[in-house]
Amino acid sequence: MGDDVVLSFHDSLLRVSDVHLLSGPYWLNDNIIGFAFEFIENVLCKDCSGIFSFISPQVTQFIKLVNEPGELDAFLEPLSLSTKKFVALAVNDSESRSDVGGSHWSLLVLDVDSGVFRHYDSSSQHNHDAARLLARQLARYMRIVSDRFVEEEMPQQRNGYDCGVYAIAVAEELCKSEMHIGDVGSANLASITPSYVESCRQRLRKLISELHDEKIHTPN
């Protein structure tokens, strides 16, 4: 089977090697996180589709390191970010503009109306500098004059490879909280335990398998 394509879902493409990362103990790459964001926005929390905008890891990396704000227009104008309530981005500590790579993931969420950036890091603010840079870049593009940056308290990972799963889990909890009670601040982040993170990996693998089978058995 090699490294064949397993699933094409909205703007994400997953191969065998990507899905294998979910079996653990492996660090998740940008393809898996991009898929998870697509699923959260378009399926899991579709009722919040006009509220949340999830930016792919590849575009997030470009935003973080771009030199000229005008370069962002082609990527971000179609997303109409100013019309959303929240913008969510997976932060990576890589300093390469052409390759996400890196060694750690965290989640940055912009409250568009207030201009507040909230950073959720499962490894003791490891990504603080990268997230702060990203926030400044996005604030400049969106003309947010007095942006504020807050490091949010959240459960901490106990290994060196689950950061991406934590970022996905937090994104899910924030969306569900907004969808059900209209307040992301009430999200139950304490529920994101090591066992929950492991179950999240398993759920993602099962989900990809089900979507793969569904596409195979659905007539064009």
Image (cartoon, helix red, strand yellow):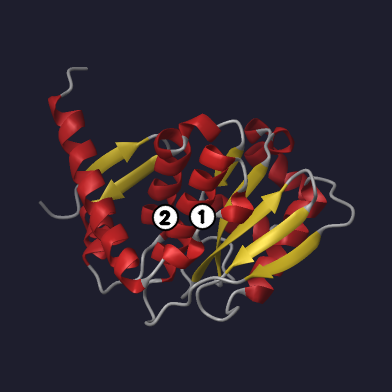
Front in this rendered view, residue 121 or 14: 121
**Hey, which residue is sitting farthest left in the picture?**
1
Is residue 110 found left or right of 40 in the rendered image?
right
Residue at screen point 65% across, 67% down: 131
Q: Residues within 10 Å of mark 2 (few under 14, many from 20)?
A: many
Residue at screen point 81% across, 52% down: 140
Is residue 57 found left or right of 72 in the rendered image?
left
Q: Secondary structure at mark 1?
A: helix
Q: Which mark is residue 33?
A: 2
- Residue 143 vertical position relative to residue 129 in the rendered view, above or below: above
- Residue 182 vertical position relative to residue 120 in the rendered view, above or below: above
Which residue position is annotated with label 1?
Answer: 57
Q: Position of residue 39 (x, y in %)?
A: 40, 41
Asked whether the viewer can see residue 184, the reply is yes
Front in this rendered view, residue 156 or 75: 156
Residue at screen point 59% across, 62% down: 97
Report the amino acid beneath label 1: Pro
Q: Residues within 10 Å of mark 1 (few under 14, many from 20)?
A: many
Front in this rendered view, residue 30 or 45: 45
For residue 201, which quarter of the picture? Answer: bottom left
Q: Are marks 1 and 2 in contact (CB under 8 Å)?
A: yes
Is residue 143 found left or right of 202 in the rendered image?
right
Is residue 132 found left or right of 186 in the rendered image?
right
Report the amino acid beneath label 2: Ile
**Hey, which residue is sitting farthest top in the picture?**
220
Q: Position of residue 26 (x, y in %)?
A: 29, 72
Q: Where does the C terminus fall, quadrant-wise?
A: top left
Q: CA distance from mark 1 to mark 2?
A: 7 Å
Whichever of labels 1 and 2 marks the residue nearer the N terminus, that label is 2
